[in-house]
Amino acid sequence: MTEKKQLFEFSGYNVSSLEILSLSGLTELRVIWSGPIQIEHFQNLTELTLNDCRRLRYIFSPTIARNLPQLCKLVIFNCEELEQIIENDQTPSQHHLQPICFPNLSSITIISCVNLSCLFPITLAHGGLPKLYRLELEDIPKLYEVFGEEDVSEDEEKVIHLPRLTYLKLDWLPYLFFFSPLGYHFIFQSLCSLAVVGCPNIITRFSVDSKDSVHAKTQASQSVDEIIVEDEIAWPIGSDILWSNGEDGEDESVFEY
């Protein structure tokens, strides 16, 4: 199996009952889904785990990404050549007006993927991750932005809520500059634990307001020494952050170091 370059290559596969897919040690695997796949065959997939699939360049084609309504857990380890989670859509714009959405995706863990530069396009954050509960990104040295593309004008701010995000960990991402593009303001009203460690170049400013909602703002110019903004307390840009609001019996040790 280590020599296999494509996994699901033909429409003849019927895996409609498949709920958990775990691929490990497929060092020559380049494509998971290829050819005229019957997308309804993956409607029940709930968990996808990839480990040591070194040649894999992307996980989902846009078509597959639009048709995983039950996917709730995505775990990726040690995929050295991984560049994208979702392949860039090559079809003409009129054919992909349907936005990509993972309606049940609640947990994303990505560790030691040395060529990944961006997690998702910012368009996915606009309602495409309504149940995201946990996001862990660790040891991804080329990650430049978490949500990428589409900067907005300096006099306009776009606010995005991830209403169920409870745990956010950004660990050893030395090249990370942006959580989101310039002009975006993320609000995490349910966040219990925040860990930002080893991200010295990030210019997104994290803060917490009087209601314990955490904010992540990316602006063109921000003062490193700006600590208090309106009713928010902000951490210095680029500093390590280990924060917990103490709910659910959790504390800073919720993420292991």
Image: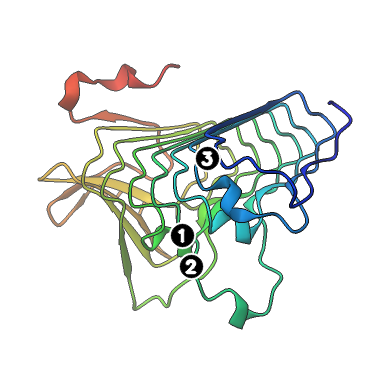
Quickly name the residue at label 2.
99
Q: How many angstroms separate mark 3 from mark 1 (CA)?
A: 20 Å
Number of numbered tags placed on the structure image: 3
Does the CB distance between marks 2 and 1 fall below 8 Å?
Answer: yes
Identify residue type, mark 3.
Answer: Leu
Q: How many angstroms separate mark 2 from mark 1 (CA)?
A: 8 Å
Quadrant that contains the N terminus: top right
Q: Is residue 51 above or below residue 213?
A: above
Q: Residues within 10 Å of mark 3 (few under 14, many from 20)?
A: many
Q: Nearer the viewer, residue 81 or 114?
A: 81
Q: Residue at x 33, y 17 (%)?
A: 253
Quickly name the residue at label 3.
45
Res 124 label:
1
Measured as percent of width and height from the top left, residue 148 is found at 53, 59
Color theme of the render: rainbow
Which one is closest to the eye, mark 3 or mark 1? 3
Q: Residues within 10 Å of mark 1 (few under 14, many from 20)?
A: some
